[in-house]
Image: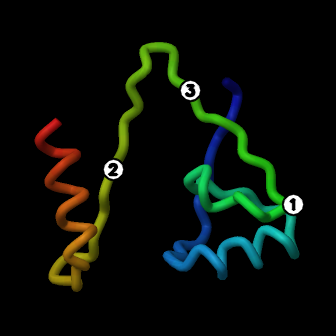
Amino acid sequence: KGFVLHPTIEVNEISMITQVLYHSRWVSILTQNSVLGNPLLKAVPLAERSGLMRASILWPKGGYKKKMAKELADILLNE
């Protein structure tokens, strides 16, 4: 409530994201397992009242898509 998000970069490497978080005032949305063993990071659960959350998957037109990303998209689209 009261948050307005303005994404400014996209990084798909967890170790790089955690280094940015260590050395800045930025925040990120990661899986809970991504912060295990990182004492400087804190996991804050995301919750939606209905229990459902909307998500978007964006790919550059004609861009390369990893097999796992395509499989995740298929799972999400068929739920």
Residue 35 pos. (x, y %): 70, 59
Crowd class of label 1 (few under 14; some 14 to 19; many from 20; radius 10 Å): few
Q: Relative to residue 43, is residue 73 depicted above or below? A: below
Between residues 23 and 68, which one lies in front from this camera angle? 68
Distance from the alpha carbon under mark 2 to that under mark 1: 30 Å
Residue matched to label 2: 56
Distance from the alpha carbon under mark 2 to that under mark 3: 17 Å
Residue pictured at 60% horizontal, 56% vertical: 33
Which numbered disc, 3 or 1, marks the residue that appears first in the sequence?
1
Left or right of 51? Residue 60 is left
Quadrant placement of the N terminus: top right
Name the amino acid, label 3: Ala
Residue pictured at 65% horizontal, 79% vertical: 15
Cβ atoms at labels 2 and 1 below 8 Å apart: no
Residue pictured at 59% horizontal, 34% vertical: 46
Residue 36 pos. (x, y %): 71, 58
Name the amino acid, label 2: Ser
Say how many tags the image has. 3
Numbered circle sitting on residue 39: 1
Residue matched to label 3: 47
User: Which of labels 2 and 1 is toward the front?
Assistant: 1
